[in-house]
């Protein structure tokens, strides 16, 4: 009887260890999947940040005209940008949200007047879990001061996307 | 007692084996079930990831105007990538796998289905008269474009079918004088006839004998008239018209609408893409309207002959914006006058520039 | 016999413990490899930043320079003037300085401190006469520049023709 009891105890101990191993395995698998999902989300957010930034760079609503309806990359037409600021509030939900989603786009002048800041697009997300910020510099062109010669300032654009 | 022990032993042994077999089978089935489900879900996940990658690539190509890009899709050579556009929403993805992508912004013109190792992406700006958006064209080396007629637009298409920066970008375009004697090149899965004569393809006329072997979905045609384009599909051995529509553009070199008609396999995709572009026109024209107001009030517009020149601007901009909105409301009937308004704005801009005043764009 | 049984049992227990330890270590390794590498999108954004910054700088206009204060001069024009009038004895005078000094001491530090320094980027902005690359016309760096850095993104070449020859400007952003 004692031998039987020992064997039973041994079997129970083995099963106990087995289930502990399964438990650890499940915990580690869960942690791995969780970190994999978070890494995926982070990667998607970064991709979205780049996509949104590319759209801003080439946005016809603010991009400089290069003459004859052509364009100039990394150049923002200040008059158009200010006009876009006026047009945007009525058009965000219908249209521009499909372009930019939850994001904030600001233009900061560096030279000559660093106090000038324009908030071009602002659609925050309540309770966002993460945020990605990208920057690019731009020439800020004003064609309303001197005919035929645009006055060009230097500034940068901040694109923040939320998830 | 010994006899009983023997009998119990005889029962115990087979009973143990049956138990082991059943338990083993259940455990095996359980794991096989998990593997099959994982395989299915992996396939779907991969499909979704590929679709998202396609979305990024198409988005980047569409944003950067006048780009010609070759995308290697050898890993998708056995999959069918589909494109459809209904009610202003383009949907594309891998057929039967993953979640498709929906896009209401980028006007995309492509065949309905592509199965290929390489994709050619080409973008051109759509101007009316200033840049509204970029059109994105999608095609593959397995699609052959047959140009009929000596129209300069056809010559331009043949020239633009190659890229000076990437030798791999080479849209298969041929020019023929007589469609009746045409036979497709080996390896071409789809044929697109581009007729500038207006007579080579007509509704009810027979499809060339060299193309009759091909499936209906593999052969299509587009005919350019004066400011009008007509789409045709193959139905058995005859051409069937899908309808005609006006080309809402100012023409000229690298006319985005002209190429949209070439690359969109069906009229529905062309119309849907144009509707997206015209919707955007409404918003961009509003921005220019506000810019116009600021320009008129600016110091530079008060000098010399500029006040006189600027006096006509607000009327032109209001007209353009109103017509853009009307066009969106009732496409295509209300859109002809929009093109006229765009031409007037273009002329105003050129005259203003020549007069030494600040142009609108 | 009993003692050998006890020893056998103890051995088995030790064996089980060893298995648990091995499996735990294996999972720890797995967790380490699950950490991501730096993504390609980071480098794409930085290259874009380099190109856009240099493009923006070169297009920027400056007013109030001698001899004609009403004339708008671009940074490109000031660079061209710096290439021709390197000695700093004639040419454009902005803010009391000739073009080379004005670029190196006033204008470019303002641009870069207001942008790349704000984004905490390490950079090296260099403009050289192609026939005399050892003596740069303009050299702006942060924390020693990008010479020994591993990951360097470039704006690409921005060539300008001047009376003294071809001027090439490049902006590098690095780790």
Image (spheres, coloured by chain):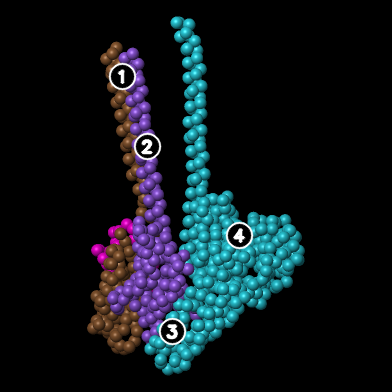
Task: Please state if B49 lies on the left or on the right of C119 as rendered.
Answer: right
Packing grade of label 4 (10 A; few <14, some 14-19, many >=20) is: some
Q: Earlier in the sequence, mark 3 or mark 4?
A: 4
| Region of the chain picked out in magenta, as a range | C139-161
Tell me which chain the residue with mark 2 is part of. A
Q: Which residue is mark 2?
A: A25
Tell me which chain the residue with mark 1 is part of. C
Disc 1 vs disc 2: which is toward the camera? Answer: 2
Q: Residue furthest bottom?
A: B304
Q: Quadrant of the C terminus of chain C?
A: bottom left
Packing grade of label 3 (10 A; few <14, some 14-19, many >=20) is: some
Alpha-carbon distance for marks 1 and 3?
A: 95 Å
Q: Which residue is mark 1?
A: C8
In the rendered image of this protein, does residue A36 appear above or below residue C169? Answer: above
Q: What residue is rendered at 56% in x and 77% in y?
A: B326
Alpha-carbon distance for marks 2 and 4?
A: 47 Å
Task: Please state if C66 lies on the left or on the right of B28 as rendered.
Answer: left
Tell me which chain the residue with mark 3 is part of. B
Q: Position of residue C127 (x, y in %)?
A: 32, 72
Q: Which residue is mark 4?
A: B112
Packing grade of label 2 (10 A; few <14, some 14-19, many >=20) is: some
* Numbered mark located on residue B293 in the image: 3
Q: Position of residue B91 (x, y in %)?
A: 55, 60
> Are the residues under marks 2 and 3 on the same chain?
no
* Circles 2, 3 touching at the beta carbon (< 8 Å): no
Q: Is residue B289 visible?
A: yes
Does the stretch in magenta take in A119? no
């Amino acid at each position: 009887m004692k031998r039987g009891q020992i064997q039973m105890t041994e079997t129970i101990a083995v099963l106990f260890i087995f289930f502990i191993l399964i438990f650890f395995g499940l915990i580690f698998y869960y942690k791995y999947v969780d970190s994999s999902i978070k890494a995926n989300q982070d990667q998607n957010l970064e991709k979205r940040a780049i996509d949104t930034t590319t759209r801003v760079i080439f946005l016809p609503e603010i991009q400089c005209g290069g003459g004859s309806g052509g364009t100039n990359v990394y150049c923002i037409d200040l008059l158009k940008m200010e006009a876009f600021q006026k047009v945007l509030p009525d058009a965000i939900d219908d249209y521009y949200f499909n372009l930019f989603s939850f994001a904030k786009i600001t233009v900061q002048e560096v030279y000559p007047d660093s106090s000038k800041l324009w908030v071009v697009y602002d659609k925050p997300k309540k309770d966002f879990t993460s945020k990605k910020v990208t920057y690019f510099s731009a020439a800020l062109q004003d064609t309303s001061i001197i005919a035929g010669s645009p006055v060009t300032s230097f500034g940068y654009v901040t694109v923040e996307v939320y998830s | 007692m010994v006899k009983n022990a023997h009998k119990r032993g005889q029962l115990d042994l087979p009973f143990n084996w049956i138990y082991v077999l059943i338990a083993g089978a259940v455990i095996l089935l359980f794991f096989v079930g998990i593997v099959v489900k994982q395989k299915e879900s992996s396939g779907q996940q991969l499909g979704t990831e590929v679709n998202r990658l396609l979305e990024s690539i198409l988005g980047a190509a569409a944003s950067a105007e006048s780009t010609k890009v070759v995308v290697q899709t050898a890993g998708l050579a056995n999959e069918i990538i589909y494109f459809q556009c209904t009610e202003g929403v383009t949907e594309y993805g891998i057929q039967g796998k993953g979640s498709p992508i929906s896009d209401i912004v980028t006007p995309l013109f492509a065949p309905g289905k592509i199965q290929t190792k390489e994709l050619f992406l080409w973008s051109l700006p759509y101007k009316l008269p200033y840049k509204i958006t970029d059109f994105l064209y999608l095609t593959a080396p397995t699609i052959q474009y047959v140009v009929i007629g000596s129209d300069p637009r056809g010559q331009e298409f043949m020239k633009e079918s190659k890229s000076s920066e990437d030798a791999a970008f080479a849209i298969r375009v041929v020019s023929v004088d007589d469609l009746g004697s045409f036979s497709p090149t080996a390896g071409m899965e789809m044929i697109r006839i581009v007729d500038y004569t207006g007579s080579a393809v007509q509704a009810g006329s027979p499809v060339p004998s060299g193309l009759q072997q091909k499936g209906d979905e593999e052969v299509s045609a587009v005919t350019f008239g004066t400011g009008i384009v007509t789409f045709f599909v193959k139905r058995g051995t005859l051409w069937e018209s899908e309808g005609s529509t006006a080309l809402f553009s100012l023409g000229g070199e690298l006319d985005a609408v002209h190429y949209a008609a070439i690359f969109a396999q069906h009229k529905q995709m062309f119309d849907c893409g144009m509707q997206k572009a015209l919707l955007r026109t409404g918003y961009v024209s509003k921005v220019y309207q506000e810019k116009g107001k600021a320009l008129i009030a600016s110091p530079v517009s008060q000098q010399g002959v500029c006040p006189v020149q600027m006096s006509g601007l607000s009327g032109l901009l209001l007209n353009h914006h109103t017509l853009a909105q009307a066009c969106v409301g009732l496409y295509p009937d209300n859109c002809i006058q929009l093109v006229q308004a765009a031409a007037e704005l273009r002329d105003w801009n050129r005259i203003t520039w020549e007069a030494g005043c600040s142009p609108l764009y | 016999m009993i003692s050998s049984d006890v020893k056998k049992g103890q051995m088995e227990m030790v064996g089980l413990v060893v298995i648990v330890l091995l499996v735990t270590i294996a999972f720890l390794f797995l967790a380490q490899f699950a950490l991501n590498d730096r993504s390609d999108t980071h480098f794409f954004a930085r290259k874009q930043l380099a190109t856009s910054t240099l493009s923006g700088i070169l297009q920027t206009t400056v007013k109030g320079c001698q001899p004609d204060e009403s004339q708008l001069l671009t940074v490109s024009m000031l660079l061209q003037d710096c290439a021709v009038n390197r000695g700093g004895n004639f040419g454009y005078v902005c803010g009391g300085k000739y073009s080379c000094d004005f670029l190196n001491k006033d204008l470019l530090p303002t641009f870069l401190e207001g942008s790349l320094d704000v984004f905490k980027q390490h950079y090296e902005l260099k403009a050289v006469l192609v026939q005399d690359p050892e003596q740069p016309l303009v050299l702006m760096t942060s924390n020693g520049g990008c010479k020994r850095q591993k990951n360097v993104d470039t704006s690409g070449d921005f060539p300008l023709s001047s009376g003294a020859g071809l001027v090439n400007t490049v902006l590098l952003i690095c780790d």
